[in-house]
Image (cartoon, grey):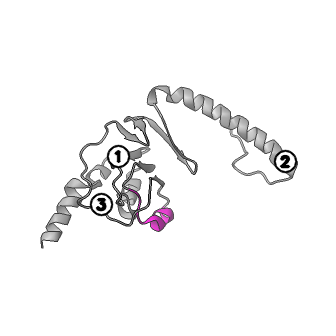
Amino acid sequence: DDYTAWSNNYYSEICIYPWAKDELDGYFMAIDVSGVDAGLMGSENALGCKMAGCRGFVLNGGGIRDTDECIVEQIPVWSYFVSQKMDQARIRYIEKDIPIAIGGVAIYPGDIIVADGDGVIVVPRAVARDVAKYASRELYNDKNARREKYEKLGWELDDSVINKEL
């Protein structure tokens, strides 16, 4: 029928699936969806990217859907919103490996994305080694200071206060 033909074309030519077939080992996908309020990433397409080696996703809209499944599948996603709406016919995938902006921050191919429960930062590739050197020193010092407080409080040490050698 017409829907099946349209759907087959969308999923094979227009959506993210063709890109998910690329080698993504170690990559973190930053996707510019121009703020569209529709769930771009869901448990099935995000899992396909994870299988290809993708480490996570950050989106400037085009939020996540299937959040319960994505949590179970341990797929890290940062987006402006969660949306039950599907994205078919709302989003057309045009290019990859191009500069984009998310949250007013320029992201270039090869930049380093660091994301955790506090949010997302982008480290330009040109300064990544220096940033890593200073950030690791800061983390090392922070863990030592907090470990001393844990010990004074009689708390059991955990990974957040145990340092590996620099």
Magenta segment range? 63-73
Task: Tell me the SS state at disc 2.
Answer: helix
Residue 103, by quadrant, is top left
Sequence-wise first label, 3 or 2: 3
In depth, the one of 28 and 93 nearer the eye is 93
Q: Can residue 166 be seen in this view?
A: no
Q: In this view, does 102 lie above or below 124?
A: below
Q: Is residue 161 visible?
A: yes
Please state the horizontal and vertical placement of residue 161, each as a whole percent of the image. Answer: 73, 45
Front of the two marks 1 and 2: 1
> What kind of residue is marked 3?
Asp
Left or right of 166: which side holds 7?
Answer: left
Left or right of 139: which side holds 108?
Answer: left
Please state the horizontal and vertical placement of residue 116, each as a whole percent of the image. Answer: 56, 48
Task: Tell me the SS state at disc 1.
Answer: loop
The image shows a total of numbered marks equal to 3
> What kind of residue is marked 1?
Asp
Q: Name the residue under label 2.
A: 151
Q: Which residue lies furthest to the left in this view?
A: 1
Q: Name the residue under label 3.
A: 87
Q: Name the residue under label 1.
A: 32
Left or right of 122: which side holds 100?
Answer: left
> Which residue is rendered at x = 34% and y = 36% of the image?
99
> Which residue is rendered at x = 12% and y = 73% of the image?
1
